[in-house]
Amino acid sequence: MNTTFRIGLKNCSFFARHGVLEAEQQLGQRFFVDVDMHVCAGTALSHDDLDSTVDYGVAFQAIEKIVTQERYQLIEALAYRIGSGLCETFPPIKRVSVTIRKPAAPVPGVLDHAEVCVEYIPE
């Protein structure tokens, strides 16, 4: 049997300097990240085995490091990097969906936020 389960981290908030415009890179802004990790169960469910799952505290720290210490013009490139980084760090992840919201997107109009979602599937 090939059982999987989902681990989600929702509305993770980080201050960073992503964007195309010089002002975005200088001033920075808050970004909100949602991650859904689809994990191969291994023995995590049947044996309550921490080593067979994804430690979501460690996953949060990995996301935070990517968002705050690397710089991207495109939030879709950032989302891809988060997905690939999580899959490299945690081999039980079989698919990850990363959504990034940018509330202060430089758009000439009224909106709540700009958003991208990237689904990463490791080879």
Image: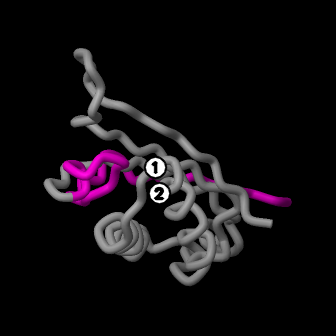
Quadrant occupied by the N terminus = bottom right
Residue found 22% across the figure and 36% down from its top: 104
Kindly indicate whether the residue at mark 1 contacts the one at mark 2 (C-beta within 8 angstroms): yes
Residue lying furthest bottom in this view? 51
In the picture as drawn, the residue positioned furthest to the left comes out as 27
Q: From the viewer's perspective, is residue 58 above or below residue 100?
A: below
What is the number of the mark on residue 78? 2
Q: Which picture quadrant has residue 106? A: top left
Under mark 2, the amino acid is Leu
Q: Is residue 94 magenta?
A: no
Q: Residue furthest front?
A: 22
User: Which circle marks residue 74 in the picture?
Assistant: 1
Residue 46: x %, y % from top left: 65, 69
- Where is residue 11 shown, x and y percent of the image? 30, 46
Secondary element at image label 2: helix
Which corner quadrant holds the C terminus? bottom right
Q: Given the image, on which type of amino acid does mark 1 rest?
A: Leu
10 Å crowding of disc 2: few (<14), some (14-19), many (20+) = many
Q: Residue at x 57, y 52 (%)?
A: 6
Left or right side of 104 for 72: right
Element class at badge 1? loop
Q: Colour mode?
A: one colour
What residue do we see at 56% from left, 72% from top?
Answer: 53
**Rendered position, 37 above or below 66:** above
Q: Is residue 118 above or below residue 45?
A: above
Magenta residues, as a range?
1-25
The alpha-carbon separation of the residues under discs 2 and 1 comes to 7 Å
Q: Is residue 36 visible?
A: yes
The answer to whether one can see residue 47 in this image is: no
Q: Position of residue 29 (x, y in %)?
A: 19, 50
Can you give x and y, in whole percent of width and height, for residue 96 in the image?
Answer: 60, 55
